[in-house]
Every structure is written in C-alpha cells, then in structure tokens.
Image: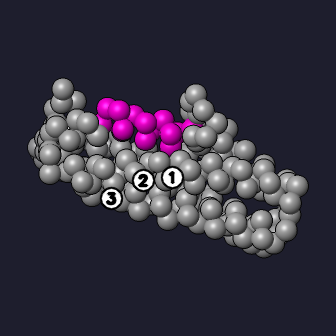
Amino acid sequence: MSRARAPRQAKAPGEHLVEELRWIHGALRRDLNQLRKLADQIGRGAAPDRVRSTVRSLQTRGPLWQLRTNCLSYCRLVHSHHGNEDVRLFPAVRRSNPALVPAVKRLEADHRRISDLLDQVEALADLLRSDDRPETRKRLIAALDAVGSELLAHLDLEEKTIIPTLRQWRDWPR
C-alpha cells in the first residue's frame, strides 16, 4: 500500500531572497552570542591577549567579521552585507514599495552606526593590550553590548519591514 504524498505548497516568488537574508542574519546572531560571551569574560578579568585573540578569531573565521573591503574602518561581512543592501537591495525595495522609504532610511542609518561600533570594538580590544585598566574594560564591554543591541534591533526591523516585499519578487526589480 503506497502512501499518497501531500502536495508541496508553492513558495512565494521571492522566498529564496528571504531564506538568504535569514541565513546571513543567523550567522550574524551566532557571532553576537560570541561577543556577549567575550563581554562576560572581559568583565571577569580575561587577559588582554585572550580578548584580542578572540576578536582576531572572529575577524578571521566568524561570519560577522569576514570579507573586509577597501577600508579598515568597516568590518567584514557586516560591511559587505550592509553595503550590498545599501547599493542593491534598498533601492529596489524603495522602487517596489515606496511606503517602506522611511524604514529603509532608518536601516541605512543603522548600517553606519553599526560600522562605527564595530570599529570601536576593534580599537578598544587593541588598546586593552597596553591599557588594562578597569575603565578600558568597561568601555570595551559597553561597545560589545552596543554592537549586540544595535545589530539585533536592526536585524529584527529589517526582517519585519522588508520580508513581505521580498516575498513578492520573482527577480530583483530593475
């Protein structure tokens, strides 16, 4: 006796875009968990070399910090992902759904703020090697916390606002 298969539900036309966005956001969220752990370690007195090593590890292997382009002031995958959104995705979203223009402007402003925060984390991790005072540690913990809260809020807003529009796309709107 053979079992009848349930018919597959057709995916929304742009579901592949949604899946890609969620995959990238999942990678970013995983690295944010690493940053939170690092902030806890710093608060408990982790050695400066260990802190720097962890940041370097994220920079070289973690998706959050990959694909550095052109400028030391931008962190790798976040910069690349946000740059792609700014240049390709957001203009298409604006054309496709003009009601999202205010949300897109906010997302673009988030990109600049998050980039600055990631630069601050890197600079403070470097500083900790020569200045292991409690104040330096507090500043680094605050910067890590800020990256986490800013980036999570950004990812949530982006998913909430643009995914319904992406689902309707068959291709990138021109």
Is disc 1 surrounded by few (<14), some (14 to 19) or many (20+) residues within 10 Å? many
Q: Quadrant of residue 43?
A: bottom right
Measure how far apart labels 3 and 2 are at the Cα level: 10 Å
Q: Is residue 151 above or below residue 67?
A: below
Quarter of the image with the C terminus is top left
Q: Residue at x 35, y 32 (%)?
A: 87
Upstream in sequence: badge 3 or badge 2: 2
**Residue 143 seen in render:** yes
Q: Residue at x 40, y 57 (%)?
A: 154
Give the SS element for disc 1: helix
The amino acid pointed to by label 3 is Leu
Residue lying at the far right of the rendered structure = 130
Name the residue that disc number 1 marks: 114
Give the SS element for disc 3: helix
Query: Is residue 142 a member of the stretch shown in magenta?
Result: no
Q: Quadrant of residue 166?
A: top left
Picture disc at residue 157: 3
Q: Residue at x 57, y 54 (%)?
A: 117
Secondary structure of the magenta portion, mostly? helix
Q: Quadrant of residue 21?
A: top left
Measure how far apart labels 2 and 1 are at the Cα level: 6 Å
Picture disc at residue 110: 2
Q: State which region is magenta.
A: 76-89
Residue 38 is left or right of residue 6, and the answer is right
Residue nearest the viewer, comparing 7 with 83: 83
**Residue 28 seen in render:** no
Residue 40: give x, y in percent of width and height: 69, 70
Give the SS element for disc 2: helix
| CB within 8 Å, label 3 to label 2 | yes
